[in-house]
Image (cartoon, grey):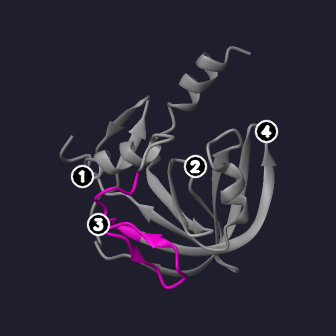
Amino acid sequence: MDQRAFRNALGQFATGVAIVTTTVDGENLGSTISSFNSVSLDPPLVLFSLIRNSLGFNQWKKAGAFCIAILGEDQQDLSNRFAKAGTDKWTGIPIARAENGAPRLPGAIAYFECEPYDNCDGGDHEVFVCRVTNFEVPQHGAPSLIFYSGKYRQLATREAA
């Protein structure tokens, strides 16, 4: 199968953009994700996935707490920063802590604090299923950052379009 063509086809499904964070052995980790989904209301479960050959993947597997920040449409720079491997993503970012101890990025439109629930084989990715222990929506009504067909996009109402 042509992987590039497959990836382009998958890109036809618009996704929101989030950043998942954790702290393992005193090191703050963060990664931009578009693979965030709800799984269950009872118990409250969400999932995200990370590519297995990513820098620090083994650290992610040891994490005991996560904070997932749903990015607003004005947070493209933050998304780009946390999408890059091997850089100091945290320089200049004030680090607050979620109740579960995971780093909490500023300015997100929603936060989900989670603990590991289960991991699943996802081919070249690992799927992290997490139990939500707390959540907050500080910016009701603010549109999320959208990724579609390889580019950031913005939501618009049908009337505005």
Q: Quadrant of the N terminus?
A: top right
**Residue 55's spot in the image, x, y percent?**
61, 43
Classify mark 1: helix, strand or loop.
loop
Residue highlighted by disc 4: 123
Q: Do the CB atoms of the residues marked 3 and 2 lie less than 8 Å apart?
A: no
Depth check: give the residue in front, 103 or 9. Answer: 103
Which quadrant would the C terminus be assigned to in this image? top left
- Element at badge 2? loop
Q: Which mark is first along the chain, 2 or 3?
A: 2
Q: Say whether disc 4 or disc 2 marks the residue closer to the N-terminus.
A: 2
Dot 4 or dot 1, earlier in sequence: 1
- Label 4 with label 2: CB-CB less than 8 Å: no
What is the spatial separation of the Cα atoms under label 4 and label 2, in whole angstroms?
14 Å
How many discs appear?
Answer: 4
For label 3, the SS is loop
Which residue is situated farthest in the front direction here?
26
- Residue holding disc 2: 35
Residue 29, horizontal then vertical, whole percent: 53, 59
Residue lying at 33% horizontally and 56% vertically, measured from the top left? 91
Query: Gap in Å between the C-alphas at discs 3 and 2?
Result: 20 Å
Q: Which residue is labeled 1 in the image?
A: 74
**Labels 1 and 3: the sequence-earlier one:** 1
Dominant secondary structure, magenta:
loop
Please name the amino acid that badge 1 sits on: Asp
Dot 3 amino acid type: Gly
The residues colored magenta run 89-110
Residue 117 drawn in magenta: no
